[in-house]
Image: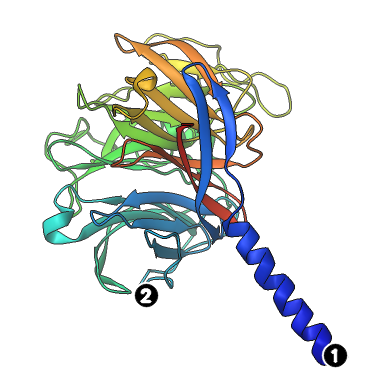
């Protein structure tokens, strides 16, 4: 009887796996037609970022501290070896990953993670070569200073500019007042060279009391970032508190106001700072109140979904949706909320080489999803 029961249980598990793989795609209505959302891969533990490899495979980070290659058929590779130690507590863990613009030649990647150390933890950026089953020549090229205790607001997204230098969006680690302090990296966008160190044209080079890597300041917790394909400018999206999520276009030396100005309120309901505007502080390109808890961001400039061309796409952790923001002359003129009812925390948003949109869901059984027009 036990043998029969065990056989039955194995068959049930096998059938469950087949059903999971063959689960039907979901369909959602959009302004430009029906959309189909299908599962490309699953079984990822709280995935945070994905990057497309030239051969069609995906490179995916998992917040507990693993990086995997996902095959074209959706199967998961073993965790890559030689990752540095990761502080995988609270919002910390293994975070963003991007390919160097010359990856096809040099196999170089950059990734961010919360690094443990004296004083607590802080966001760090590493450079490595992607090998077969492991990372090679791993080197830390940036460390957020100082390291502090707690598990809040590590950021972070990495964007490579046209000059090859890297922008990195950093959270203020829950220490809001220090986002205005140029002597620390908390609550900043930093700009570093691909090998590490500050480029000589950074805005605070040579300024007493300011760290040379800082590009812009007054940020709360940056969760998405892109390079605008037309202008080459950096765009970011960051969490507000209770409301006040912002899309910004950080420029050299600019102050984006947190926590002096904000469109949000404290979680207690009390006001924060001095209002919504102040001389010398930048206004957001767009803000949400109430908050959607924005995550990854992408710019849609492909042909598979022509009605989306020129839009920003932003994921929502809070509502499990995809926000499409229509742009005109660098301004957001309207918002369409898509995939409502997906019932998954959307952590990352990327446009694939096929012109389709790919999402990561932030769950213990996280998935890679593909969004495409329903035929």
Q: Which residue is mark 2?
A: 81
Which quadrant would residue 296 be assigned to in this image?
Answer: top left
Observer-nearest of 181 and 344: 344
Q: Is residue 204 above or below residue 113?
A: above
- Left or right, residue 164 beside residue 47: left
Observer-nearest of 282 and 14: 14
Which quadrant would residue 108 be assigned to in this image?
Answer: bottom left
Residue at the image point whose x is 85% and y is 90% from the top: 2
Q: Is residue 308 above or below residue 188?
A: above
Observer-nearest of 57 and 294: 57
Residue at the image point whose x is 61% and y is 64% from the top: 18
Could you tell me if residue 97 is visible in this image?
Answer: no
Q: Which residue is mark 1?
A: 2
| Other residues around mark 2 within 10 Å, as few (<14) / some (14–19) / many (≥20) | some
Q: Is residue 59 above or below residue 1?
A: above
Which quadrant would residue 168 be assigned to in this image?
Answer: top left
Residue at the image point whose x is 57% and y is 43% from the top: 25
């Amino acid at each position: 009887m036990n043998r029969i029961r065990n056989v039955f249980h194995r068959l049930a598990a096998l059938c469950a796996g087949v059903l999971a793989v063959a689960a039907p795609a979901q369909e959602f209505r959009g302004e430009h037609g029906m959309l189909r959302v299908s599962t490309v891969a699953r079984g990822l533990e709280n995935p945070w970022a994905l990057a497309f490899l030239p051969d069609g495979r995906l490179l995916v980070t998992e917040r507990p501290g693993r990086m995997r290659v996902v095959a074209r058929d959706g199967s998961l590779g073993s965790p890559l070896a030689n990752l540095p130690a990761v502080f995988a507590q609270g919002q910390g863990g293994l975070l963003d990953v991007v390919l160097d613009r010359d990856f096809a030649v040099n196999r170089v990647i950059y990734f961010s993670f919360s690094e443990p150390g004296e004083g607590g933890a802080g966001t760090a950026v590493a450079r490595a070569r992607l090998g077969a089953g492991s990372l090679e020549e791993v080197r830390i090229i940036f460390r957020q200073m100082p390291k502090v205790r707690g598990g809040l607001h590590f950021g972070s997204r990495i964007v490579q500019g046209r000059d090859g230098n890297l922008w990195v969006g950093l959270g203020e680690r829950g220490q809001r007042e220090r986002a205005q302090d140029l002597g620390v990296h908390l609550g900043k966008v930093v700009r570093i060279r691909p090998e590490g160190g500050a480029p000589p044209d950074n805005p605070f080079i040579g300024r007493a009391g300011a760290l040379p890597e800082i590009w812009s300041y007054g940020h709360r917790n940056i969760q998405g970032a892109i390079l605008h394909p037309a202008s080459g400018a950096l765009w970011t999206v960051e969490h507000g508190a209770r409301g006040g999520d912002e899309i910004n276009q950080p420029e050299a030396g600019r102050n984006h106001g947190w926590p002096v100005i904000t469109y949000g309120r404290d979680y207690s309901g009390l006001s924060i700072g001095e209002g919504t505007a102040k001389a010398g502080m930048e206004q957001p390109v767009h803000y949400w109140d109430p908050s959607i808890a924005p995550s990854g961001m992408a710019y849609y400039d492909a042909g598979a979904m022509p009605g989306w061309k020129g839009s920003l796409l932003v994921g929502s952790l809070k509502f499990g949706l995809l926000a499409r923001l229509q742009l005109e002359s660098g301004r957001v003129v309207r918002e369409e909320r898509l995939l409502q009812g997906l019932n998954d925390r959307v952590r990352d948003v990327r446009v694939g080489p096929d012109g389709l949109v790919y999402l990561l869901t932030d769950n213990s059984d996280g998935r890679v999803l593909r969004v495409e027009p329903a035929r």
